[in-house]
Amino acid sequence: MTHKMEIDGIEVTFSEGETILEVAERHQKEIPTLCYDPRLEPFGGCRLCIVELEGSRNPVASCTTQATAGMVVRTVTDTIEAYRKTLLEMVVSENREVDVPPLRGYASGELASLRDKYEINGTSISGAKSGTNKADDNPFILRDYELCISCYRCVRVCAEQEGDHAINVMNRGFHTQITTEFDGLLKDSACTFCGQCIQTCPTGALADKKALRAVDEVADAVPDKTRTICPYCGVGCSVDVLTKNEKIVGIHPAMDGPANQGALCVKGQFAYDFVHHPDRLKTPLVRGDDGELHEATWDDALDRTAEGFRKVNAEHGRHSVYGVASGRAPSEAAYLMQKFIRVGFGTNYIDNCSRA
Amino acid sequence: MSNPLVDMQKPEVIFCIGTNMTECHPVAATGLKKAVARGAKLIVADPRRIGLAEMSDLFLPLRVGSDTALLLGMAHVIAREGLINEDFIKNRTTGFDAFFEHISQWTPEWAESITGVPAKDIETAAMLYGSADKGAIYYTLGITEHICGVENVQSLCNLALMTGNIGREGTGINPMRGQNNIQGAGDSGALPNNYPGFQAVTDPEYQAKFKAEYGREIDLEKGITKVTALDLCGEGIHAMLIDGENTLISDPDREHCEHALRSLEHLVVIDIFLTETAELADVVLPATAWGETDGVCTNTERRVQRMRAAVPPPGEAKPDWWIICQIAQRLGFEGFDFDTPKPIFNELCRISPIYAGLDWDRIEKGATDTLNNQWPVPHKDHPGTPRLHEETFVNGRGIFSNVHYRDPAETIDEEFPVWLTTGRRLQSYHTRTQTGRAQGIDYLLSEESLEVNPADIERWELADGEWCKMSSARGSITIKVKATNRSPRGTVFASFSFADVPVNMLTGSGYDPVTHTAELKVCPVRLEPL
């Protein structure tokens, strides 16, 4: 059932259960947020998304306030913008740095872009910095808590999206720290290294260590992105492959991936660099008279391939040739493999690797 | 899967059997975890206390290979307690009366004697699933990699049919596919019994269609499976073209497999690495990898999606489709004149009714609010089919199967007194040709170990962290022992991922007679200290 409300002087419709923020975003309103991840339960921690609500004495957090019929909301007023700017100044003042390489994670530039939008130079408020870095020798997740702003997106994505509950909050207020149980290494916690905490972090406090290996090469530029599907299991998660200079430098989950809605696992997130491994086959190989495999030209290798099939077919008949298609290559390969057998030999001597 | 992945958050009761989803399909498992957090009841049947078992409401630790008995016992209770969906049975199924009579003998007490699961837990599971308005079944290779894989799947179908838990949101029979395009490989006709789009090679209509399409006579009978082909290597089969499969490590009974491949006069392997299988080839042809290849794949929920090249391939590596075209052209075969993948995929769509409404351009655009690209997509204006069997079954009515329990091909005895079951782990993928070459993965998992119950370690005089010798009727390997309560007493577990611990030297006791899927989940072994 749809209802009506007013946002910035325009009548809009909404469905039961939507928050003011969701309705506003659907109508192209840009409300700043830091603790908000649309995949997670409303949290209302950062207060940046406050809006004026007619009949309410104080501004309300639009991410936690459900829309109701007849509401009159203003998303941008001088007072609201001043509040937001002050909040951002305080957040920015606590962090060692705000400009971080985009390789740190999918959302890592959120704080910097809000700082730019609100033209905060970082000098109006100064004081102690919060957060203590955690040395952790794992090869995937950098725990640079000096950049943590206690939005708890990492804790919530781990609990709500992954159901792993590997990390939580220690201490309160200025001494708030994200940590594992017993404040140990991620390896010794329930962490599965899915990387979701990295990708939701709005400041780069949790960062993709593996992608950061390419930080000098990529510098501050945003790497090129190519939308594809993860190479591993059959779930078919959508990913964006990050590339620079013809190299894959990292993976971002596709937040709009129909099968994964932004989720990934350790393999899809981090096990991509086999593509550039020196063991990759770069030329055809043909077995020589010495019994060893030797590099060959495509022409020679294809001739040898064809000749072998022709000879076996001639000597043993068309039922002596068998084709096995891959469950890893795209469907065009499997389709042509079966066509090769059916058109070429007139048999159904074709299978794929699904039986073992 | 009969139902889409998003449905995983919708059931009231979820029955997972033979699926280690949190490790093998971790992202799918996130949906299931959300359902559980919301209050859905989770029943897990598995020989091992896997991650899913830890979060379940009811855990049924059945003996390996006893699934059919468990499921017959559950069907018995559902019928006995009157939890059947009479309307659904009347309107949508056939054979229930005979099935009803059949299951009257398979009491939960009988099932307990086979499975080791207490009868009262079998009853509770049946009542939970049978009472749910939305009950969903999820399974993986723990159901199919048995000599009775077909009966196991039929038993699950029986449960869904008798309770009407199919064809609606949050229900269904949902096998999770293991490889990024294993569904697509079957869709594309790389099967001995089906042309592209699952059109049976034995059906005269399709025989005529493909004779016209491919311009030649094709055998009117089914071909042989890869398992049979390997059995015939050197006798009937003398040449093989293998694309992207490390057969030697992933298939059961490695010694047999190696002997088979070595007996071929001509073995050609297309792959991205010199795998153990490629090392046996006469010609190895270098393929482009994921990230370098444009094409289309299909996921476990029948969603057809676009894979894209992001970087150029190394050296002279070429796409698999290009390689196959080149071989075909040199043999003078017609119909392999392709320069890009697009017309290949469009040809597949044109001749496959399930893909008829799809083409390269539609897949390129991706899913939209109105088009989801889950097959069947019978015509261009069709939005796709997230849920199968909503109005009717493909064959008209759902058929009850009067299955019987069978023992595994080999059962434990004095010589081989321990059940070995095999599987996968979160951090490695299949034979590690890829994950083994990804930096950092070794930090999480650098070697294979055999999961043994601490009491069994004592009983077999082994030591945690030390090596042991594990032998089956086919061979022996050495493997490090790891004490864990994940393994019940009398059952041990290892993955087949590490080439230096070739667990598939031991497996291969039997195959499902219909699907020829190997019984990789059951292998009696003997453990000895080194």
Image (cartoon, coloured by chain):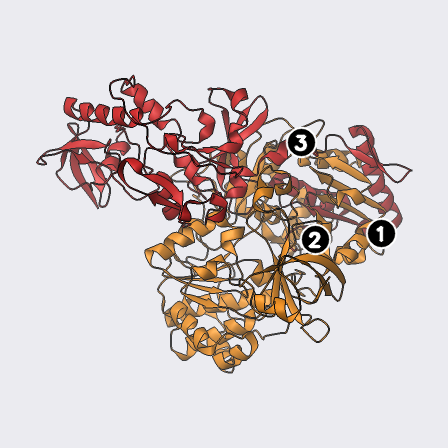
* Residue A8 in the image: above or below residue B514: above
Colour of chain A as rendered:
red
Give percent across and percent down for residue B496.
Answer: 66, 54
Q: Residue furthest right?
A: A289
Q: Is residue B235 left or right of residue A203?
A: right
Which residue is found at the position 50% from the left and 54% from the top? Answer: B21
Q: Chain of mark 1?
A: B
Q: Position of residue A264 (x, y in %)?
A: 47, 42
Give the number of the mark in front: 2 or 1.
2
Name the amino acid type tagged 3.
Phe
Chain ID of residue with mark 2: B
Do the residues indicated by labels 2 and 1 lie within the same chain of the protein? yes
Q: Is residue B438 visible?
A: yes
The orange-tinted chain is B
Tag 2 residue: B501
**Label 2 crowd (10 A; few <14 / some 14-19 / many >=20):** some
What residue is at 25 percent from the left and 28 percent from the top? A29
Secondary-structure class at tag 1: loop
Chain identity of mark 3: B
Q: Which mark is residue B338?
A: 3
In the rendered structure, are the residues bearing label 2 and label 1 in contact, judged by CB atoms less than 8 Å apart? no
Q: How far is mark 2 from mark 1, CA to CA?
A: 24 Å
Please tell me how many numbered marks the rendered image carries.
3
Residue B513: quarter of image:
bottom right
Q: Compared with residue A336, is residue A11 higher up or lower down, i.e. above or below?
A: above
The answer, for residue A349, to whether it is visible in the render is no
Quadrant of the drawing holding the C terminus of chain B: bottom right
Please rate how many residues cluster around mark 3, counting C-alpha atoms within 10 Å: few if below 14, some from 14 to 19, many from 20: few
Residue type of the residue flagged with mark 2: Val
Viewer-nearest of labels 1 and 3? Answer: 1
Q: SS class of the residue under badge 3? A: loop
Nearer the observer, A68 or B446: B446
